[in-house]
Each structure stands twice: as C-alpha cells, then as structure tokens.
Image (spheres, rainbow, N blue to C red):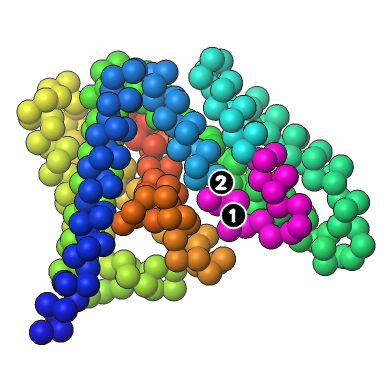
Amino acid sequence: MKLMAKVGQLRPELRSRIRTGVIGGALLLAVTLGLGTVGTAIVAVGIALFMTHEYLGMVLSLDDKVIKRQVFLGIVWLVGFFSVFFPRVEYGLLLAAFLGTFFYFLATASRHAESPESLERHLRELVYGFFGTVYLAFLPLFLPLIRDESDGGRWLLTFFLINWVGDSAAYFVGMKKGRSKLYPAISPKKTWEGAWGGLAGSFIVTLFFKLLAFRGMSWAFVVLGPLLVGASAQLGDLCESFVKRAFQRKDSGNLLPGHGGVLDRFDGLVISAPVMYLCIRILG
C-alpha cells in the first residue's frame, strides 16, 4: 500500500517530466540537426544564458545584484557571439571575461567600502560570478564544436542519446532498485544502483545506434565513450547539486515543468560536452 501511494504521488510529476522532455528534446534536435553548426551555437548560447541567469539568482545577494546580473549575462552573450563568428578564440575570450569582470567589480567596490563584511561579500560575488561564467558559458560552447566535426550530426545525436537515456535509466533504476546512497551529503536521492543503471543505459543506446545508424563510430568509442561521457554527465548533476545545496535551493528555477530550471535539466550536458568532444577526437 505504501508503494502504491508513492507511485500515485510520483505519477503527475513523472507525466510532466516526460511531456517536457519529449517536447524540449524534439525542438532541440530540430534546431541542432536541422540548422547545422550555427543553429547548434545559437542553442548553446541560449542554454548558457538561461543557466547563468538561474545560477546568478542563487549566488548574488547584495543590493546591486540586478546590475551585476546584467554584466555577467552581457559577458555570456558576448562570449557566445564571438565564439560563433570567430571560432577557436576561447583563450582570448576567457582572458577578456576575467579582466572585464575584475575591472567592473573594482570600479564598484566603493559602494561596499563602508564595512569590511560588505566588501568581502562583493569580492565573493566576483568569484562566484566568474566561476559561473566559465562553468555555464564556456563549457556549452563545445556543442557547436561537436556539430562541426565530420559526421557531426550523428555525433551530436549520439551525445544527446547518451545523456537522455542515461539520465532516464538512472532515474527509473534508482527509483525501483536504489538502496546504496551515492553521495548523501550533496544529493540524498541518488544511489549507486541508479548510477550503474544510467551507465548501462548509455552503453546500450550507443551500441544500438552504431549498429543501426552510425557504422562509422569506432568500437573504441562504443566501449569507452558511454562510460566517460555518461559518468561526466552524472558528475555534472552532482556539481549542480553541490551549488544548490550550498545556497539551500531545491531547484535552480521553475521554467521546465517536471524538471525545475534550465540548469536542472542541462547540468549533466555542461560537464559532459567537453568530454564528448575529446572522446570524438581521440576515439571516434
């Protein structure tokens, strides 16, 4: 009876989660696969802007948080713009973002100089904000790099399948079989059984995709790619849980029904995108 009650409680959330995932996934695939590298870059920048907006809502608290958010979102937009039209300039963009944010926070430090505590919080928000810029603006830009590879459409679809199937498998296996907590201090609901189920789902879908639609995928990637990309996606989920736990937030936002915020939905993608790119270059 208790199990049935729990299933009944989860059912509306699960329906909402599936509906949002199917619609969102279809739109994502239509743009990234249909519009090529430019479309993928637009998607990556859009995701980065939404994720950074939600992240800044958690970490900024001083009275000038609105203008600080605008500054960081402006940097994210500029990083995305230059990455689309001037690819392979990531180091220069990173340096410009660092200097720009540092100089802005230096110029506005006088607003918080009335007390050492306020000034220290101002500096802390600089560190939080720049960390978020690197974390959420630069890492998603590996998506257009994946799309730009030879057979980039198939590689990008492989990447999404590894993430989506792995996430769904981890969710359902963890819900049904989960017993051993993975990292309860950071994410109390995640289990080792769910993590292994997610990796198994990623491997199976990669194997089937190679046999059915992507003969050019190497067997080295089939064996190692899902393990590395799937594990990094789960690590990305824990990274976001770490941030939310530190700022006592359940979700990063409420834009996506059944998932929470955009950062909640794409946290695994952020960390796994550069890993996928490296796997393609080395194993693909």
Q: Is residue 107 magenta?
A: no
Q: Name which residue lies at 50% across and 38% down.
A: 48
Q: Residue 277, position in %: x, y?
A: 37, 30
In the image: residue 279, left or right of residue 42: left
What secondary structure is found at the residue carrying circle 2?
A: helix
Q: What residue did someone put label 1 on?
A: 57
What secondary structure is found at the residue carrying circle 1?
A: helix
Q: Is residue 27 visible?
A: yes
| Amino acid type, callout 1 | Gly
- Marker count (numbered): 2
Q: Which mark is residue 165?
A: none
Assign the magenta stretch its main secondary structure: helix
In the image: residue 207, left or right of residue 28: left
Q: Which corner quadrant holds the N terminus? A: bottom left
In the image: residue 84, left or right of residue 152: right
- Using the rendered view, name the quadrant where residue 182 is placed: bottom left
Q: Which corner quadrant holds the C terminus? A: top left
Q: Residue 51, position in %: x, y?
A: 49, 45
| Amino acid type, callout 2 | His
Q: Is residue 35 above or below residue 120?
A: above
Q: Residue 256, position in %: x, y?
A: 37, 50
In the image: residue 76, left or right of residue 249: right
Q: Residue furthest bottom?
A: 1
Q: Which mark is residue 53?
A: 2
Labels 2 and 1 touching (C-beta < 8 A): yes
Q: Name which residue lies at 59% across and 54% down.
A: 57
Q: Is residue 199 visible?
A: no
Q: Name which residue lies at 82% across and 67% down.
A: 117
Residue closest to the eye, 25 or 8: 8
What distance separates the C-alpha of mark 2 from that of mark 1?
6 Å
* Range covered by the magenta-colored residues: 53-72
Local packing at callout 2 (Cα closer than 10 Å; few below 14, some 14-19, many 20+) is many
